[in-house]
Amino acid sequence: MLKVGRTMQLSRITIGFIVVIFASCGGSGEPVAVGTLERDRIELRTEQFEPILELAVQEGDVVETGEVLVRLDERRATARVASSQAARDLAVARLAELVRWSRPEELAEGRARLEEARSRLIEIKPGLERARALVAEGVETLQTLDIAEAAHAGAIANQDAAAAALELLLNGATVEELDQAEAEVARAESELEVTRIQLERLVVRAPRGGRIDALPFKVGDEPPVGSTVVVLLPGGAPFARIYVPSELRPIVKAGVSVRISVEGIAENFEGVVRCVSSEAAFTPYFALTERDRGRLVYLAEIDLVGDAAQDLPTGLPVEVVF
């Protein structure tokens, strides 16, 4: 079984540019923040201890959603599916043995008749009690009581007949035994579905289109449970991760449009603030100056807009103008 994890990784070049500045851009007096381009990472992890049989891709390959990436040994999982299938078939056969020749619709009809007879008995009983009370008070005659008692006795007889008819349909099996057999079939079906899912997830597929960033293991390796077997960088434009100084925080909000310049590229890019942290932190310890280390900042992420940003590499330093 595989679990998809989502992490964000700062590139090595980030260390040199993580410091956030509050300065003018090109002499215009516009507030600027500095950061780097980053991409989300999808880590596909194994939850079963099985050796790798096939690596269907290589690092750097571009893949589509649903494409096979890695195959793990399926023999043990296939055996578990077969065992669960046999247990399910045994439970179904046991249920059929209890039901015998009675068809499901006949059993449903028998249960309905028994329930109807029980309901009728419940309805008649208060009338019998009222008749007894009225006769005791001298309001009604004994004939009225006889009629009520006869109706009550008839309802009891109908209930007993319906119960006997249902028992006959069950051919010796009680209602409780039949319920237990049906529950066992449901349990076996659930167990079979679990083993089928485990078998399917031994084939690692791409949850999204993107580029293969890393394949930590080779064919024949047995990754421990929970190990990452594929690192996938989703397609699309990267985002800018910056630290907003406290002076700028009031104007930096989700949805605000910004202008982004990327080191080494002449053209500017448009961007939209994705999110800003609500809690302040101090500039990281590797800031360049003693003054910057003591400044409060807020982590922010900005989505780059436009097709031109799709192929930008991660790790490049950026300047964001608000």
Image (tube, grey):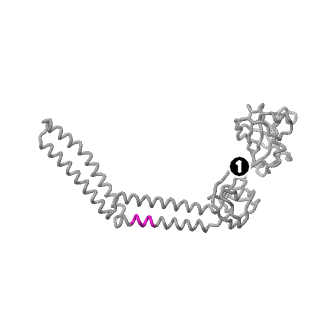
Q: Quadrant of the N terminus?
A: bottom right
Q: Quadrant of the C terminus?
A: top right
Q: Position of residue 38 (x, y in %)?
A: 76, 47
Q: Main secondary structure of the magenta part?
A: helix
Q: Position of residue 319 (x, y in %)?
A: 82, 40
Determine which quarter of the picture holds residue 2.
Answer: bottom right
Residue 135 among those drawn in magenta: no
Left or right, 249 with respect to 71, comes to right
Q: Which residues are magenta?
A: 90-96
Determine which quarter of the picture holds residue 298.
Answer: top right
Residue at 35% x, 66% y is: 100
Left or right, 221 with respect to 263, comes to left
Q: Label 1 neighbourhood size at 10 Å, few (<14), some (14-19), many (20+)?
A: few
Residue 91 among those drawn in magenta: yes
Instruction: Tell me how many marks there are.
Output: 1
Q: Is residue 172 above or below residue 130?
A: below
Q: Position of residue 13 (x, y in %)?
A: 83, 47
Foreground of the two, 285 or 264: 285
Query: Which residue is identified by label 1?
Result: 7
Residue at 83% x, 39% y is: 287
Foreground of the two, 21 or 74: 74
Q: Is residue 37 above or below residue 196?
A: above
Q: What amino acid is labelled 1 in the image?
A: Thr
Left or right, 274 with respect to 153, comes to right
Q: Position of residue 257 (x, y in %)?
A: 74, 38
Q: Is residue 320 above or below residue 195?
A: above
Q: Could you tell me which secondary element the residue under label 1 belongs to?
A: strand
